[in-house]
Amino acid sequence: MNKKIIVTGGAGYIGSHTVVELVAAGYEPVIIDDFRNSRSWIIDRIAELTGKSPLGYAVDCADEKEVLSVFRNHNDIAGVIHFAAYKAVGESVQKPTMYYQNNIGSLCTVLNAMKETGISNLVFSSSCTVYGQPDKPEVTENTLIQKANSPYGDTKIICERIVESVLASGQNIKGALLRYFNPIGAHPTSKLGELPNGIPNNLVPYITQTAAGLREQLVVNGNDYNTPDGTNIRDYIHVVDLAKAHVKAIEWLERQTKNCCEAFNLGTGKGSSVLEIIHNFEKVNGVKLNYKIGPRRAGDVEQIFANPSKAEKELGWKCQYSVADALKHSWDWEKTL
Ligand code: UFG
């Protein structure tokens, strides 16, 4: 059986946790990552955790020639998990062409290399951002795809459509589009976790850096929303649960007998408000956070959480960690940095 899986962006936050879970499930990950938004020592951490040094190529995922040569170096690849992409919403507003070029270009490069080498299984990193501000906060995969709030979000919508178009063109493709909700937490061993570049944009790394004294104060982006405590609601999912869903998605693709392209929501099914996350973090870690209420942040949707039934039923996957576990693991990780 072919057990090699190409993982682009395999040294990144979700990628590195996924590589660990792939090894645990008996796969052999082949990482493509040029470390522009990750660190090379993460590879050593993966080796420490799994007892195996993963194969790695320091290659830009948009480089057609180099990517194809990695694919051609291995004749026993069972599938590709494509993480490599830019992911900062605010930055994408400032540098739209950089986002479109990189995120769309690298997916096209991967799809072309798959065609050249006859690989059909593809797991693509998508996002709940494709739903925009939904009419109802709980979304299924059939919820309308809305106009994106940012170039970053637009790249996710376009990339999903590219995989569908490639399928329609007759290329042998089995695609799983994984729509992530808000990944948080770190590996329970504190060997892997999130490494934000500069000032974090996302809530949990901002919380941990504030608790660690690296940031003075956390600002809650508005408390006048139409939610029980006035703050935004999101579905926060432990990164290890998210990583395990990728292994389940690869196994699901291997079971498919026909070409296909299916989207799956990956969330817990439960929303938490910003204030709930702050208070949960304080309680589970026994630390006090310096925070204040500020104005709304442009582009924030009011509330959204996943209906994860399709992933649970079809992939045979379910979240095992609680939000409290994730907040503890995030703090344990921060303390190692
Ligand atoms: N928040 C604060 N203060 C902060 C940071 C965040 O109050 O310092 C709030 C935000 O306003 C939001 C919530 O915390 O209400 C979560 O914000 P994040 O930035 O952590 O996450 P988002 O939901 O905005 O973004 C995430 C992903 C994106 C994805 C988007 C889709 O990071 O990749 O979901 O909605 F596009």
Image (spheres, helix red, strand yellow):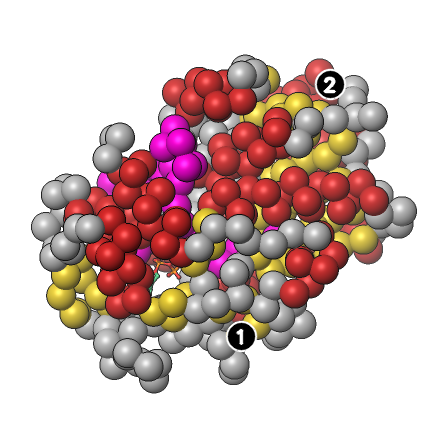
Quick one: SS at disc 1? strand
Q: CA distance from mark 2 to mark 1?
A: 42 Å
Per the image, the residue denoted by label 2 is 74
Residue farthest toward the right in the current orientation of the protein: 257
Mark number displayed over residue 81: none
- Inspect this view and state whether residue 65 appears: no
Any atom of ligand 1 within 8 Å of the CB at mark 2?
no
The spot of residue 280 in percent (x, y) is 29, 60
Q: Which mark is residue 138?
A: 1
Span colored in magenta: 178-203
Give the side of residue 218 with respect to residue 171, left or right.
left
Residue found 66% across the figure and 58% down from its top: 312
Q: What residue appears at the point 52 percent right and 82 percent down from the top-left corner?
A: 135
Q: Residue at x 70, y 52 (%)?
A: 316
Residue 187 shows in this picture: yes
Q: Quadrant of the C terminus?
A: top left
- The local crowd at label 2, few if under 14, some if 14 to 19, many if 20 or more residues have their Cα within 10 Å, is few
Is residue 257 part of the magenta span, yes or no? no
* Most foreground residue, 221 or 150: 221
Is residue 299 positioned above or below 99 on the image? below
**Amino acid bearing label 1:** Glu
**Residue 306, how many percent across, how many down?**
54, 66
Q: Residues within 10 Å of mark 1 (few under 14, many from 20)?
A: some
Residue 318 appears left or right of 215: right
